[in-house]
Image (tube, rainbow, N blue to C red):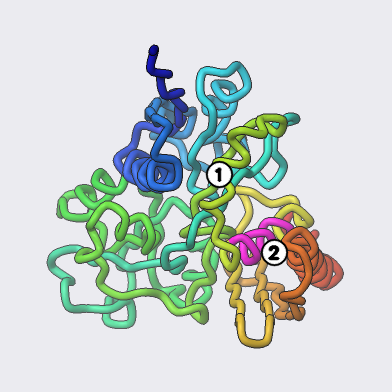
């Protein structure tokens, strides 16, 4: 009697160390939930990986780290794609859907100090110190709290950025990175301290992984369902709706801080839009109660509505002007 071969499901990802580590996490979860299937990782490069000498905000493309992956998904070379959810545009291409959102790692920003500043915090650094980050969101918020520093773009994968920090010739006193990325590739020991929400609200969906698949691929959708982390998906649905309503991306300083209290079902969103120089900020905080007896889709709809509500409040308060500057 012939033994039926296991179907091989191909998982698309970027080639960076972090992207590969994140995809291995997803692959391991899939293998645990579906031991009778095989999973193969297919790495590829994106525009964001290839263009390293230009600031992300100046490339002028929202799908910097996702476009090539989605083309492979569309033409069937891969069955689903793993993204850092913060890189995935809030409006997906026709025929694509977000099949799963995994449990969120710490979403906050981390300060990594140069070796000579090892035991210091940002508050200890002298005026004129150079802080490296490629994020307009971080720059705008840090300029607001630390106007005495100089901010310089730093691109490349995490190891490349840390190497630039450690080389005295580059002049960085510190760089700011996501806690989640450092943690996932076992570089958490490079974190000098974590920025509080008062210092820097994090990026939309930072710390969460999103798995994208074809909308009509019911097999993959069913396979991905167990990977969903409900609390994370609620938070990210809210945040992505907030960003979609504002129509922001890498070129706009938008920050969020979201919490969900399972005991009473309170979902709370603090959203912010800033000018590039950090001098002008509009922000608002609102909450809603998630009815835990409702269907998941109904709960996600409430999260979506909260994101839209906070965004609209900011637009009414002048965010539109900041977004078009």
Q: Quadrant of residue 17?
A: top left
Q: Looking at the image, is 251 positioned above or below residue 291?
A: above
The residue sitting at 47% across, 70% down in the picture is 142
Give the quadrant of the N terminus. Answer: top left
Magenta stretch secondary structure, dominant: helix
Residue in view at x 63 percent, y 54 percent? 252
Answer few, some or many: residues within 10 Å of disc 2's Cα (few below 14, many 20 plus, some between 14 and 19): many
Between 231 and 19, the one nearer to me in the picture? 231
Where is mark 1, residue-wise? 224
Compared to residue 225, the image places residue 66 above or below, namely above
Residue 144: percent from left, percent from top = 53, 74
- Comparing marks 2 and 1, which lies closer to the viewer? 1
Q: Is residue 169 above or below residue 274?
A: above
Q: Which residues are magenta?
A: 233-241
Residue that badge 2 annotates: 238
Kindly give the residue lying farthest to the top in the view shown.
Answer: 2
Residue at screen point 68% across, 47% down: 90
Q: Is residue 311 visible?
A: no
Residue closest to the far right:
316
Numbered mark located on residue 242 in the image: none
Bin the neighbour count of mark 1 within 10 Å (Cα to Cα): few under 14, some 14-19, many 20 and up: many
Is residue 236 on the magenta stretch?
Answer: yes
Percent from the top left, x then y, of residue 130?
32, 62
Image-based side of 195 in relation to 66, left or right: left
Q: Is residue 57 magenta?
A: no
Question: Which residue is pictured at 48% across the width and 62% down the height?
Answer: 104
Of residues 88 and 112, the one nearer the viewer is 88
307 horizontally vs 5: left or right: right
């Amino acid at each position: 009697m012939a033994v039926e071969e296991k179907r091989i499901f191909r998982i698309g990802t970027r080639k960076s160390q972090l992207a590969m580590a994140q995809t291995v996490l997803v692959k391991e979860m899939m293998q645990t939930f579906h031991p009778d299937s095989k999973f193969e990782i297919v790495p590829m490069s994106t525009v964001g990986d290839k263009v390293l000498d230009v600031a992300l905000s100046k490339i002028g493309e929202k799908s910097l780290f996702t476009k090539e992956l989605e083309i492979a998904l569309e033409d069937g070379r891969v069955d689903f794609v793993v993204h850092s959810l913060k890189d995935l545009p809030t409006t997906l291409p026709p025929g694509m859907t977000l099949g799963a959102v995994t449990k969120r790692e710490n979403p906050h920003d981390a300060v990594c100090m140069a070796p000579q500043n090892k035991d210091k915090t940002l508050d200890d650094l002298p005026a004129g110190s150079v802080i490296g980050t490629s994020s307009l969101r971080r720059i705008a918020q840090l300029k607001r709290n630390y106007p005495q520093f100089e901010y310089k773009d730093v691109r490349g994968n995490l190891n490349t950025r840390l190497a630039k920090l450690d080389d005295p010739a580059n002049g960085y006193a510190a760089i700011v990175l996501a806690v989640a990325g450092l943690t996932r590739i076992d570089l958490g020991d490079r974190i000098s301290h974590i920025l509080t929400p008062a210092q820097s609200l994090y990026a939309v969906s930072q710390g969460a992984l999103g798995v994208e698949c074809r909308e009509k691929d019911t097999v993959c959708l069913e396979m991905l369902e167990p990977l969903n982390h409900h609390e994370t998906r609620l938070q990210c649905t809210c945040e992505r709706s907030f960003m979609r309503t504002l129509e922001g991306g890498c070129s706009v300083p938008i920050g969020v801080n979201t919490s969900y209290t399972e005991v009473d079902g309170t979902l709370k969103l603090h959203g912010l839009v800033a000018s590039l120089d950090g001098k002008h900020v509009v922000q608002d905080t609102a909450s809603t109660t998630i009815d835990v007896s409702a269907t998941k889709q109904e709960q996600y709809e409430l999260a979506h509505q909260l994101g839209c509500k906070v965004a609209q409040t900011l637009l009414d308060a002048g965010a539109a002007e900041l977004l078009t500057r």
